Image (tube, helix red, strand yellow):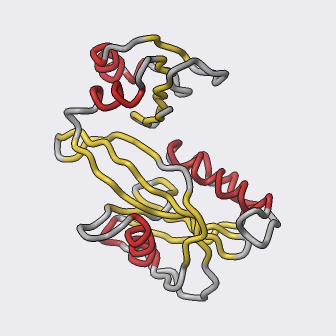
Amino acid sequence: MYKVFIENKPVIFTTHANKEDLSMLRTNDFRDLEKLISEIHLVPKEGILIECDDPEKLLGQTFQSYKYIEAAGGVVVNQNAILLIHRLGMWDLPKGKIEKGENTEEAALREIEEECGIHGHQIVCSLTNTLHTYEMKGKKVIKRTYWYAMTYEGVDQLIPQTEEDITEVRWVKLSEIDRFQPLMYPSLLPVLNECIHLIKNGTVFENGSAE
């Protein structure tokens, strides 16, 4: 199964229908998808489920004309708080493009340091990867972001990377995170909620408290 967020709406490619409450289209023709994408504004915000024989092949055909970019970022946990950035009117998770010669983990650690000003954060485990599309300088882009759950125990002053349009960096308590989710991109919510689940059940993080 592959999930791509197009204009903040999930489009899921799968071999069989599941119980998700989404509209469904059965097709193996990427031209059907091109038409759907051109009319994505007509699709409900819940998104659409594409049932096909070969999701990977259909995904590649559908976005073959898009520029492909890889990025990496993380959900940084400090005791009972998560690190968020505010950029272009939305609350976001720190992330950025992978530079030449970097692996995904190196890129994620570097981007968080650059965007937030912290040092000494460490990767705990990988999280769900995300795919989303956007336009940049008139060109269509599909971006894959590799996400990691991280821990941080320092006391560095948070410094937003203003040249990347970041206006604020903030530690948000888990007990208050629900207030921020409506102001975040939908593609980030599965990543954020996966990390919160790991915190609460204590399988990865030592502190299982959500207060």
Residue 28 placement: quadrant: top left
Q: Is residue 9 visible?
A: yes
Q: Where is residue 13 in the image (x, y as percent from the top left)?
A: 46, 26
Measuring 47% from the left and 13% from the top, which residue is drawn there?
25
Nearer the observer, 107 or 15: 15
Q: Where is residue 75 in the image (x, y as percent from the top left)?
A: 57, 63
Specify whether 100 is left or right of 52: left
Q: Where is residue 49 in the image (x, y as percent from the top left)?
A: 51, 21
Measuring 40% from the left and 56% from the top, which residue is drawn there?
88
Residue farthest toward the front in the current orientation of the protein = 53
Specify whether 101 is left or right of 40: left
Judge whether 19 appears above or below 74 on screen: above
Nearer the observer, 131 or 118: 131
Nearer the observer, 118 or 1: 1
Measuring 34% from the left and 27% from the top, which residue is drawn there?
57
Nearer the observer, 28 or 91: 28
Judge whether 202 appears above or below 56 on screen: below
Q: Where is residue 151 in the image (x, y as percent from the top left)?
A: 62, 75
Residue 83 placement: quadrant: bottom right
